[in-house]
Amino acid sequence: MSSERSQGLRGQMSPLGRGSAILAGAVLLGAIGGALAERKPSTAELICIVIASVVALAMLGDRAFPWAIVLVAVVPWYPIVAESAEAPIVPQKVLCAGIAAAPLVPWMWSLALGGRRTRPSRGALLMGVLFGSMALLIYETLGSVTHVIDSKVVGFVFTGVAFLCARRFGAGRGWLPAAFAGIAVLALLGADAYVKAPAHRVGYFVGYPITYGALVVGLLPAALLFAYERSRLLAGGLVAGCAALLIFSESRSSWVAATMMLIVAVVIQGRAGNFKALGAVIAAIVVLVGLIVGTGSLSKIVEQKLGPNIARTQSVTHRQWSYGYAFETIGKQPLFGAGAPGFSAEEAANRTSIGAIDNGYLSITVDMGFVGLIAALIPIAIALRVLGRCMRYGITPRFELALALGILGMAVVTIFYDSFYWAQIDLLFGAMGGVLSLRMRNVGPAAGALPARAVRRTRRIRWAI
């Protein structure tokens, strides 16, 4: 009885606290805006936008967390059109502030408004210890916070921050619409970039086209689930649109990731006996392939964008060098590596014309050793565990499956790319993995599921009766 009463009081006080927070934010917004508008209008505008964003996120409640993560991930921090990777159009400190604010601001609002509590776990403790230790190691190696910010790899540390903050939002509210909105933003920006420069690759506004492709495959499953629950036509349009985005980004690793996601989804649906969903997936594939093959101009575009002679490309030669260098260096410093993210990229830039090792797992191991690799693999391991449980018990929990497939897609891209050093991908890795770590109980016998053999046995018994 006392528990119910306390919950009721909390429910009554939460709107009051939220209203007070909104009122305080509005007062602060007006005061700062009025004080600065006369002398520095641009600064006043920036501060007003920041405060308005914080107040808006506070109004969203628990849904603020996924919206903040996704919006920071898809915001065009870099030039819309480019021919190679360029510096961000905002100062590095502003970019780092946005990365830090995405997980921390909703988390702090949740604490202030008395949100739900989560039980501690050994996995979360391991994540906190690993990333806390690596943050100290990076600081000791680089010597100052300024150097950590300027190193442009601060996003890797915030993988752990996003993971731990996400555990406060285990209900997962807001992820599906936020993912759909993120795909829509990427599509609009991609269309704008293509119209301005049709001959260039699409996706430089998030840093690099492969980063763009990784964000698309990471958000696609959740966005597709959101669209499918509302309209099959909308879901079909989303699939076709994302296929176009990946084609014009010329990111072959993203196509490999999308294919792997599709294979896993088909196998899990078949294992669960969801032949209706399986038929819908196969029908979408047939229509998409038929559209590409049957339309001459579209077929030529696909062939031009995705069909260069890979054996002669510079990327393949560089990848061969990267593997040899990485294995040799890891053997010398296996535990903690060089102790600084970005070390392998600098070495690659000094020795070759490409400033990266084309494998995220190898580059993080060179830089941070096997300790850093284990930390980076935690969200991916959680996603693989979810997919394994779906296979084992023949179940398809839609929300958990969507997040797990998104992480799988980004993990496949990482085989060919330094994904861990792009903050947008790091935020999605950590946030999705943190939510999944709390929702693991929804995937398995604890959620009332039976193994596939038991389900088939039950059906045979009923048929016999």
Image: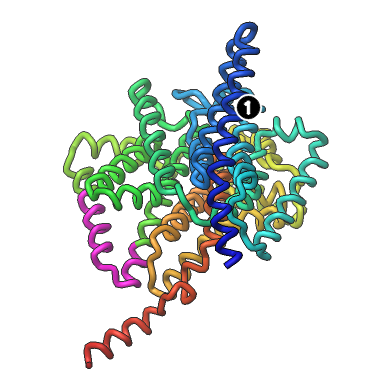
Residue occupying image coordinates x 52% and y 44%:
61
Residue 282 in the image: above or below residue 46 = below
Q: Nearer the viewer, residue 427 or 193?
A: 427
In the image, residue 227 lies at what x, y percent? 31, 47
Residue reaching furthest top? 38
Residue 41 in the image: above or below residue 64 = above
Magenta span main SS:
helix
Relative horizontal placement of residue 316, taking residue 372 as reference (left or right): left
Q: Nearer the viewer, residue 47 or 315?
A: 47
In the image, residue 72 lies at what x, y percent? 53, 35
Q: Secondary structure at mark 1?
A: helix
Q: Is residue 358 visible?
A: no
In the image, residue 206 lies at what x, y percent? 50, 32
In the image, residue 442 lies at what x, y percent? 47, 67
The colour scheme is: rainbow
Where does the magenta region start and end? 266-287
Q: Quadrant of residue 417?
A: top right
Q: Is residue 284 visible?
A: yes
Residue reaching furthest bottom? 465
Q: Is residue 323 magenta?
A: no
Residue occupying image coordinates x 30% and y 46%:
239
Residue occupying image coordinates x 39% and y 25%:
193
Neighbour tally class for label 1: few under 14, some 14-19, many 20 plus, Cα within 10 Å: few
Q: Nearer the viewer, residue 323 or 221?
A: 221
Say which quadrant the N terminus sits in. bottom right
Q: Nearer the viewer, residue 35 or 87?
A: 35
Name the amino acid type tagged 1. Val
Q: Is residue 279 magenta?
A: yes
Residue 460 in the image: above or below residue 69 = below
Residue highlighted by disc 1: 94
